[in-house]
Image (cartoon, rainbow, N blue to C red):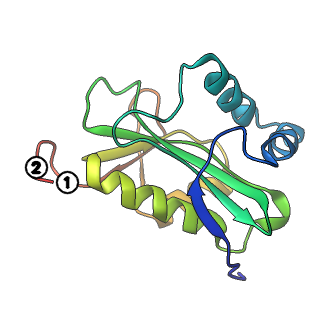
Amino acid sequence: MTYVACDCREVTPREPGFHDLAREARSEGYGFIDRLDQEWADGSNRFDRAGESLLGLIQGGMLVGIGGLNRDPYAGDAETGRIRHLYVRRVWRRTGLATRLMRELLARSDLIFSRVRLRTDNPQAKRLYEGLGFRPTDEPQATHVRQVRTAGACR
């Protein structure tokens, strides 16, 4: 694995290169970047509630990866976050960028949430998430969960 230097910062779907990233994801059969764009446009998810972030990886002025942290809409409690819409462009994979993006999202989540959930059916993504402390779960609407601390503990 080669490590690539890039900027990791808050972004929106209006970021230059977002639609190229979405087109690539769509060509691989991933519709979640289009869903991110639609939810942003209709206002249903702007990653703007307390503790939420939408981060992008910028390399040479180009958006090469994206990922978000939301309050988990399926969990039914304020203590659970959710990793959403994680995608790194094909030519930038296996460079450490997905790990870097996840570590930044998890550092933010650890300040707010007692646990974080996600859903994936991608074998490579499963390995990434499990390597970062997520464990498989049979909870509804999630395939993996990462316990940060006991709910209600001091932050």
Residue for point 72% across, 83% down: 2
**Image-quadrant location for residue 90:** bottom right
Residue at which label 2 appears: 153
Residue for point 30% across, 56% down: 110
Position of residue 110 in the picture relative to residue 39 (left or right): left
The residues bearing labels 2 and 1 have C-alpha atoms spaced at a distance of: 7 Å
Question: Which is nearer the eye, 74 or 46?
Answer: 46
- Could you say where residue 6 lies in the image, as x and y percent from the top left? 67, 72
Q: Secondary structure at mark 1?
A: loop
41 relative to 32, above or below: above
Residue for point 68% across, 78% down: 5
25 relative to 4, above or below: above
Give the amino acid type for the residue marked by disc 1 in the picture.
Answer: Arg
Give the amino acid type for the residue marked by disc 2 in the picture.
Answer: Ala
**Image-quadrant location for residue 59:** bottom right
Label number found at residue 10:
none
Position of residue 44 in the picture relative to residue 138 (left or right): right
Question: Which is nearer the eye, 68 or 144?
Answer: 68
For the residues labelled 2 and 1, say whether their Cβ atoms are less than 8 Å apart: yes
How many marks are shown on the rendered structure?
Answer: 2
Q: Which residue is outermost to the bottom?
A: 2
Position of residue 73 in the picture relative to residue 16 (left or right): left
124 relative to 43, above or below: below
**Image-quadrant location for residue 76:** top left
- Could you say where residue 37 lies in the image, as x and y percent from the top left? 70, 30
Q: Secondary structure at mark 2?
A: loop
Q: Quadrant of the N terminus?
A: bottom right
Position of residue 101 in the picture relative to residue 30 (left or right): left
Q: Quadrant of the C terminus?
A: bottom left
Residue at which label 1 appears: 149
- Could you say where residue 75 lies in the image, as x and y percent from the top left? 34, 27
Q: Neighbour class for label 2 at 10 Å: few (<14), some, many (≥20)? A: few
